[in-house]
Image (cartoon, grey):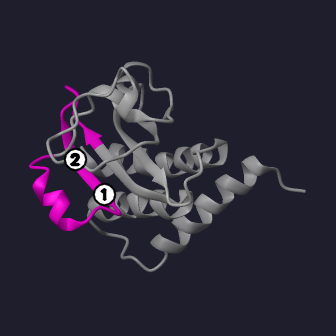
Amino acid sequence: MATRTTDAEARALRALSHALRNLPERRSPDVDLQIVADLAKELTGARYAAVAITDRHDRTQGFFVAGLDPAILRALKGPPQGHGPLGSLREDGRPVRYENVETSRKSFGFPPKHPHMQRLMGIALWVGTDVRGSIYITDREDGAQFDDDDERMLLTLGQHASSVIQHRWF
C-alpha cells in the first residue's frame, strides 16, 4: 500500500510529466517555471502560487504567478523581493508556513497593491548549495490549512524548478 508521502510526490510527478509531455524539447525555461507555478496552485488548491528566481545577491530576476488577475499583477510594479515572510528561505532554506502572514512579525516587504493573503507556505529552490529562488502558495480555496502533503508536492515541483534554474536559467 502506498504511503501519503509517495502519493503526494507521485501526484506532483504525474502532473508535471503530463504538463511537459507535448512541449518541444527546446523551449524557454520560462515555460517550465510557469508550469511549476500553475501546478503548485492546482495541486494544493491554493488561491495564488508564485515561483521567484533570484540572482546571487538575492534580487528577484524571474517571477511566475498563477491565480493572480493580470491587472493586479501589472499594478504591483515589480515582483516581491523576498523580504519579510519569505526572507528566511534565503537564510536557512527551510520550508515556511504561516497561518496568518499578515499578523506575523515578519510581515513586511510586500510591494504596494499586493493582494491580500492570510495563509502562506513556501519552499526554497536550491542550485547546488545556494538558494536561488522560492515557490510559495497562499490561501487554499477550501479554507483549510496547508499540510505536509502540500509541502511534499511543492518540494517535488521545486526539484524540477531547481534543475531548470541550474541548467537553463543562469
Magenta segment boundaries in residue numbering = 53-78
In the image, farthest residue toward the front: 103
Residue 104 among magenta residues: no
Within 10 Å of disc 2 (Cα), the crowding (few <14, some 14-19, many 20+) is some
Say which residue label 2 marks.
Answer: 114
Q: In the rendering, at what x and y percent does residue 114 appear?
A: 22, 47
Separation (CA) of disc 1 from disc 2: 13 Å
Q: Which quarter of the picture shows residue 52?
A: top left
Looking at the image, which is closer to me, 17 or 44? 44
Circle 1: residue type? Val
In the image, farthest residue toward the bottom: 22
| Vertical side of 98 occupied by 17: above or below | below
| Vertical side of 150 occupied by 56: above or below | above
Say which residue label 1 marks.
Answer: 65
Q: Residue at x 82, y 50 (%)?
A: 3
Of the 4 image quadrants, the one containing the N terminus is: bottom right
Q: Residue at x 29, y 61 (%)?
A: 68
Q: Residue at x 15, y 65 (%)?
A: 71
Q: Which mark is residue 87?
A: none
Q: In the rendering, at what x and y percent does residue 63 appear?
A: 24, 50
| Sequence-first disc among 1 and 2 | 1
